[in-house]
């Protein structure tokens, strides 16, 4: 999380410019007729599977505070983190498959982690609602409507255990939120995050390790300078 957050960029920007060159009659007689270049519209944002608009706006603001656009990478939103976590919460993980959620649910020690009966999907819904309520109470606006510096300050309060959420441990929710950002940022792009292999390019990770077994000796003791490859590159 940057000490001085950078404002969010638009989710998708840019479109091609259309134009047509006008040739003289003589040039037209000697060369093929000029064609008009049709402008391409930017691809539409991917439809969300489970997140509401309010939840997606909160996550986008939080992820862009954790990972602001800079010389190292695009913003968290532009790297696809909201899409990644939406897919996770919409699947078996989000609905608690394999999790023991029966009682008793006594107050555990911090190192015991999550001790609630909620599924991850329900937990994030409750956490975002509580975070927005806290933002409105302390700063007058929901989290995604705050200035970047105020978002950063609020996340620091949550991380330090100074924020008080109704019915929820704010620090525990912060840790889950931060973890979801890191998972999405460093995941294989096939899952929706790390769009354009941004994080792998940043740290010099080449992708699927098993595919480089035969060249391991070649790079022993040397800097690995290979173009990163995703799972989808092998499909």
Image (spheres, rainbow, N blue to C red):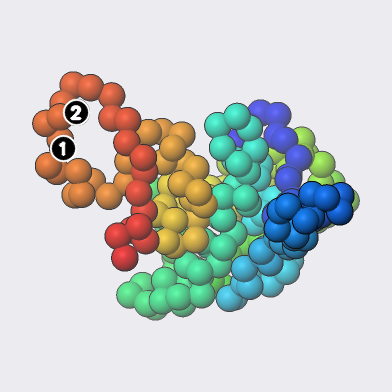
Q: Secondary structure at mark 2?
A: helix
Task: Identify the image quadrant of residue 133.
Answer: bottom right
Q: Is residue 128 left or right of residue 115?
A: right
Q: Which residue is mark 2?
A: 219
Marks 2/1 in contact by CB < 8 Å: the verdict is yes
Q: Is residue 226 left or right of residue 54?
A: left
Residue at horizontal 32 percent and vertical 46 percent from the top? 207
Report the front residue among 158 and 18: 18
State the residue lying farthest toward the top.
221
Q: Is residue 74 left or right of residue 54?
A: left
Indicate the position of residue 79 as horizontal and vertical percent values: 56, 50
Indicate the position of residue 132 as horizontal and vertical percent values: 75, 58
Residue at horizontal 62 percent and vertical 50 percent from the top? 78
Report the front residue among 132 and 183: 183
Specify the quadrant that holds the C terminus: bottom left
Q: Which residue is mark 1?
A: 215
Q: Is residue 204 left or right of residue 160?
A: left
Q: Residues within 10 Å of mark 2 (few under 14, many from 20)?
A: few
Instruction: Relative to 235, say whether 5 is above or below.
Output: above
Specify the quadrant that holds the N terminus: top right
Q: CA distance from mark 2 to mark 1?
A: 7 Å
Instruction: Relative to 47, say whether 15 is above or below.
Output: above
Residue at horizontal 50 percent and vertical 49 percent from the top? 196
Instruction: Relative to 94, say whether 32 is above or below.
Output: above
Instruction: Relative to 198, say whether 44 is above or below.
Output: below
Residue 131 in view, yes or no: no
């Amino acid at each position: 999380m940057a000490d001085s957050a950078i404002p969010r960029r638009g989710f998708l920007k840019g479109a091609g410019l259309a134009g047509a060159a006008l040739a003289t009659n003589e040039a037209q007689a000697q060369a093929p007729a000029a064609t008009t270049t049709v402008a391409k519209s930017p691809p539409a944002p991917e439809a969300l599977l489970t997140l509401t608009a309010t939840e997606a706006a909160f996550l986008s603001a939080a992820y862009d505070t954790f990972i602001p656009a800079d010389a190292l990478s695009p913003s968290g939103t532009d790297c696809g983190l909201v899409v990644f976590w939406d897919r996770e919460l919409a699947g078996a993980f989000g609905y608690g498959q394999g999790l023991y959620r029966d009682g008793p649910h006594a107050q555990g020690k911090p190192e015991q982690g999550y001790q609630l009966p909620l599924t991850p999907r329900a937990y994030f819904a409750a956490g975002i609602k509580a975070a927005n309520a806290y933002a409105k109470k302390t700063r007058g606006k929901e989290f995604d409507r705050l200035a970047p510096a105020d978002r950063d300050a609020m996340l620091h309060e949550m991380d330090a255990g100074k924020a008080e959420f109704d019915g929820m441990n704010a620090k525990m929710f912060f840790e889950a939120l931060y973890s979801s950002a890191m998972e999405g940022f460093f995941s294989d792009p096939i899952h929706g995050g790390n769009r354009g292999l941004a994080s792998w390019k940043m740290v010099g990770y080449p992708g699927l390790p098993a595919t480089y077994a035969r060249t391991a000796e070649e790079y022993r003791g040397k800097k690995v300078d290979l173009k990163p490859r995703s799972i989808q590159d092998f499909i």
